[in-house]
Image (cartoon, helix red, strand yellow):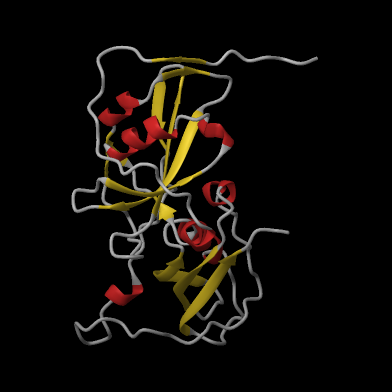
């Protein structure tokens, strides 16, 4: 049996303010998508009133790669074409351009203002901005002082010995949904009983997607007791299965 869905799009209420958008936006390339970080949380979503009222069996979602200006407003760079936008990309781009975002928990330094993945959605009168995945409270390794001084930590540490128990990380659902791959570098202290404690994050590529999952896995690793004590670096990789 075939079903036909009625698509209802209505513009209700006073018109929302317009925000400057260079249109049409180019399509995002694979290279641009490979290096994006999740956009930070939105602190002002009043511009979402620019989205029309839509009634569909599933949300209407539009996705963009953006930079951030000094006031944390999105600078739209390109659009990710997908069936779920239902042709409302132009309205969604105006709504996205008018958002105010929070300071990103981890900076993406690509091309100065960075590259962030921003999704806006609407359905049945509800509008929302995709929330970023949680980011762990863990210092950047380069901010740690060296022993006996205030200078920053060295840029590298020895590679950790092979763990006798290696818990695999859980692939973060937001990264899985975006088909993102990456890796995280962590420094950890290994103790005489073979237990380990993460100390800091040295890097994540692309930043913001995998750090929490990597830390949760590394905290459960165990090494050979009474060998290899000290501070080491480990790299946790995330790759999609073929």
Give residue 3's quadrant in the image.
top right
Give the quadrant of the C terminus.
bottom right
Give the quadrant of the N terminus.
top right
Residue at figure coordinates x 48%, y 79% from the top left = 233
Vertical placement of residue 145 versus 221, above or below: below
Is 97 or 191 nearer to us in this picture? 97
Is 116 or 221 nearer to us in this picture? 116
Residue at figure coordinates x 23%, y 52% from the top left = 69
Q: Position of residue 25 (x, y in %)?
A: 40, 45
Residue at figure coordinates x 33%, y 60% from the top left = 114
Vertical placement of residue 229 versus 138, above or below: below
Residue at figure coordinates x 53%, y 29% from the top left = 86
Q: Position of residue 53 (x, y in %)?
A: 41, 17
Q: Position of residue 100 (x, y in %)?
A: 25, 40
Q: Position of residue 52 (x, y in %)?
A: 39, 21
Give residue 170's quadrant in the image.
bottom right
């Amino acid at each position: 049996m075939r079903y036909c869905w009625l698509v209802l799009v209505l513009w209700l209420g006073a018109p929302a303010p317009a925000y400057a958008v260079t249109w049409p936006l180019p399509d995002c390339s694979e290279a641009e998508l490979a290096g994006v970080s999740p956009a930070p949380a939105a602190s002002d979503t009043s511009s979402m009133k620019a989205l029309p009222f839509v009634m569909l069996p599933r949300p209407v979602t539009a996705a963009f790669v953006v930079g951030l200006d000094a006031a944390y407003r999105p600078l739209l760079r390109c659009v990710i074409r997908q069936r779920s936008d239902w042709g409302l990309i132009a309205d969604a781009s105006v709504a996205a351009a008018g958002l105010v975002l929070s300071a990103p928990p981890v900076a993406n330094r690509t091309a100065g203002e960075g590259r962030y993945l921003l999704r806006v959605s609407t359905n049945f009168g509800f509008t929302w901005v995709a929330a970023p995945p949680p980011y762990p409270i863990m210092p950047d390794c380069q901010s740690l002082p060296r022993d006996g001084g205030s200078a920053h930590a060295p840029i590298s540490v020895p590679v950790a010995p092979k763990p006798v128990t290696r818990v695999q990380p859980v692939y973060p659902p937001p990264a899985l949904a975006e088909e993102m791959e990456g890796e995280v570098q962590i420094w950890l202290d290994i103790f005489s009983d073979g237990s380990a404690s993460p100390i800091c994050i040295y890097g994540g590529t692309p930043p913001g997607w995998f750090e929490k999952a990597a830390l949760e896995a590394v905290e459960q690793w165990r090494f050979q007791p009474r060998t290899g004590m000290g501070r080491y670096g480990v790299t946790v990789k995330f790759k999609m299965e073929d």
